[in-house]
Every structure is written in C-alpha cells, then in structure tokens.
Image: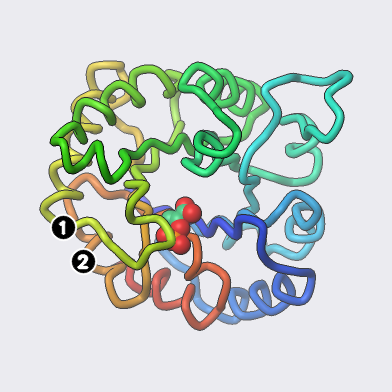
Amino acid sequence: MKKLIVGNWKMNGSAALLHDMIMGLVDFNVKNVDVVICPPYPYITMAAAMMCADKISVGAQDCSIHESGAYTGEVSVEMLRDCGAKYVIVGHSERRQYHNETNEMVKQKAMLVFASGMTPIICVGETQSEKESGQTLSVIEKQVRESVFVAPGVVVAYEPIWAIGTGLVATVDDVKTVHAHIATVLGSMGLSDTKILYGGSVKGSNASEILETENVQGVLVGGASLRIDDFVPIIDAVK
Ligand code: PEP
C-alpha cells in the first residue's frame, strides 16, 4: 500500500511559506508516496493552484458539520472541494478539545467529506491520563467505532494526545500494539484496507522506524511540516 504523508500546518504559515514549501517539494523527487499539505483555509485555493497535482495534494484541517446556510464563519465541504482540496482532517484532538467535538460530530463530518468526493482523515487518540490508567486500547476502540464513517478509502490517524507538539513519541511497541488493534477494529467494521497513520512529534530522525512499523501506512505531521528542511527528510524516509 502506498504510504501517505500529511502535513498539518494548524494556524501557522503564510503565502511566503506556501511558496517556499511548494518550490522545495517540486524540486524534490516525490515517489512511491502520496504527500498532502493542509494549510489554513485562506491558503487552500492558492496551494491547489500551485501544487503539482500528481505529486502533492492539498487538504483542509476541518470542515463544517453543516452543508450550507446561516452558519457565520463556517466553511462547507463543497467549498473546500471547489477550492481544490482532496483531503479533510476531521476530529483532530485540538478540535475535540477546544471546540467540544464529539465522536458523532466527527463521523458526520467524515460522511460529508466522503459524500463530496474527498478523503476524510479521521483522528483518534488517548490522553496522558487515559494512557497511564491503561485505557488506551478501549478509548481508541470506542473512538474508532463511533467516529469512523464506513466507506472505502477513508483514512484513520492515531495521534496520542500526549505526543502532539510535545516532542514525546510513542514507542515502536506502543505504535505496533495500538495500530494492530485499530486494524482489527476496522476489519470488524468491514474496513480492512484502511490506511492508518501515526501522528505525534514525527521528525526526520524518527520517521523511518515509525513508517516501517507494522500497520503504519503513513504519518500525520504537525510542527515538522512547517519547514521544508524538516518535512523533506520525513518524505524521504519512505522506502
Ligand atoms: C498534529 O498536530 O497532528 C501533530 C501530530 O503535531 P506534531 O507533529 O507537532 O506533534
């Protein structure tokens, strides 16, 4: 299965960064891997126009749960598709935490993304205290069962919350165990071919061991997707 590398810029970046990133990636020989950049909403159209579509795709970091109407400040899936987005991240832990998004809301968003012809990247992950109290697998299983919209081609990202932006990375054994469990749960939902990404402080220095771990079909990268010199080694780590 082709690996998938997704860069989530969060609320960072600028037109200048986008330009530098795309120029850097165009020169780089991206092969055997799908690369997606998810800049903030205002840069999606610009990114899609600049991307070399067969090499790099553009994604969004979220979408509205509504299709259209009087929802000031919201952005619909149709608008994202219209602007050239091919992927949409849904249920990122920062959305769950700061915007009270529930599994049901995440699933509804994933359904809208899929229905509009884009690929949802559905995030799940446990907190530090859930990990410490031995609840990781049960928390993740509940999130997967309740947040994943069952449809071909959806992507799931396992992002332990305690590893996001902290420099802490799950051990290879932990990644192996959790990804195997997610794969089993997805299999029981009829989604055996689903790509499962790992996210949480991925860098050039740890990308290859993570990408070579069983049941890891790619990575979701935050901080290290903001500099071409940090992002390229991660793409390069795909064998
Ligand atoms: C993320 O925000 O999805 C993420 C994984 O961030 P970081 O790589 O910075 O930990």
* Pointers 2 and 1 in contact (C-beta within 8 Å): yes
Residue drawn 67% across the image and 22% down it: 65
Residue 12, percent from left and from top: 66, 64
Residue at the spot 52% in from the left edge and 44% down from the top edge = 94
The disc label shown at residue 164, or none: none
If the image is split into quadrants, where does the C terminus sit? bottom left
Callout 2 environment at 10 Å: few (<14), some (14 to 19), or many (20+)? few
Residue 56 in the figure: left or right of residue 215 = right
Give the amino acid type for the residue marked by disc 1 in the picture: Val
- In this view, 181 is above or below 112: below
Q: Quadrant of ligand 1?
A: bottom left
Q: Quadrant of residue 146 in the image? A: top left
Give the residue pinned by disc 2. Answer: 209
Q: Quadrant of residue 237?
A: bottom left
Residue 172 — which label? 1
Of 81 and 172, which appears nearest the observer?
A: 172
**Secondary structure found at label 1:** helix
**Which mark lies nearer to you, 2 or 1?**
1
Task: Evaluate whether residue 194 shows in this view.
Answer: yes
180 shown above or below 159: above
